[in-house]
Image (tube, rainbow, N blue to C red):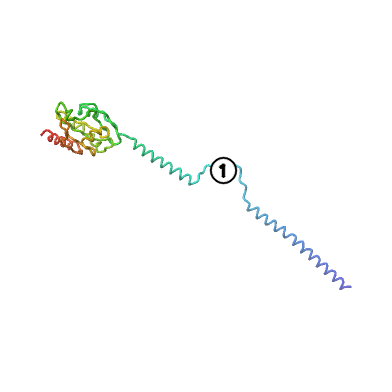
Amino acid sequence: MAKRKRGRSERRREARAEEASASTDTADPASRAGKSSAVTSSRTPRPKSARSRKAARSSRKRSLPLSTIGWVVSGAAILGLLAVLLTSAGGSQVADAATEQLARQNAGTDVTVHSGRQHVVYHSDAPLPTANAPRADGQPTLVWFSGTWCHICERMAPFAHQTASGYTDRLVFVEKSVDHDRPASGRYGVRGTPTFIMLDAAGTEVTRFHGAGDAASFAAAIEQALTAVES
């Protein structure tokens, strides 16, 4: 009888132990799941507010790709360069009223002003003398062949007409644009500017020279040309 009671009690204890173990195993998965859920929830980012989302969309709309910005900058630079080139190409020298008056006095006729990028030509409208139409006063003519594109001519402009005005009793000084009197420049074989040609009263070439650096050297060249035509 004693052995039977002990066997029953041992079986009861074993059954209780198995029930306790089963309850522990059943609870563990739940607790583990709770922990995993807690970790996962802690890593989930907080949703952005409506204002933040709107600001982000607005920023994306305003920002331009770097390639687009590069094209815009390059285009602006090219347009700026073209503007500079067009401005420089279209600019012209400004005529001087005092020089225009001197040119009329020196030539004894009207002049037409031709303004260009490099030079202002005070072009004499009268034809040059010829054997068939010589000058009645017998004076020689000093012709300045120039052009609106002649920058060396423009360097002489401040003193050329002024210096020549001191010789009006001995010669006629006229300026001719090679582009506006091609027959005259072709007649005397003008190949470059400035070219100064001294003509006698019948329009025959006596001598020529090419420019001068200042008023003194220009006056010396005129004196030398006068000596040649008067001798």
Against 34, is 88 above or below? above
Q: Nearer the viewer, residue 48 or 127?
A: 127
The residue at which mark 1 appears reads as 57
Residue at the (72%, 59%) spot, across then down: 29
- Position of 219 compared to 1: left or right? left
Q: How many marks?
A: 1
Where is residue 199 drawn, in percent x and y? 17, 33
Where is residue 7 drawn, in percent x and y? 85, 71
Residue at the (87%, 72%) spot, across then down: 4
Give the crowd class for mark 1: few <14, some 14-19, many >=20 residues within 10 Å.
few
Where is residue 49 drawn, in percent x and y? 61, 44
Indicate the secondary structure of the residue bearing disc 1: helix
Res. 54 image quadrant: top right
Q: Amino acid at mark 1?
A: Arg
Res. 203 image quadrant: top left
> Could one spot residue 45 in this view of the protein?
yes
Residue at the (41%, 42%) spot, across then down: 78
- Position of 183 compared to 64: left or right? left
Q: Quadrant of the C terminus?
A: top left
- The residue sitting at the left extreme is 231
- Position of 143 compared to 88: left or right? left
Against 91, is 35 above or below? below
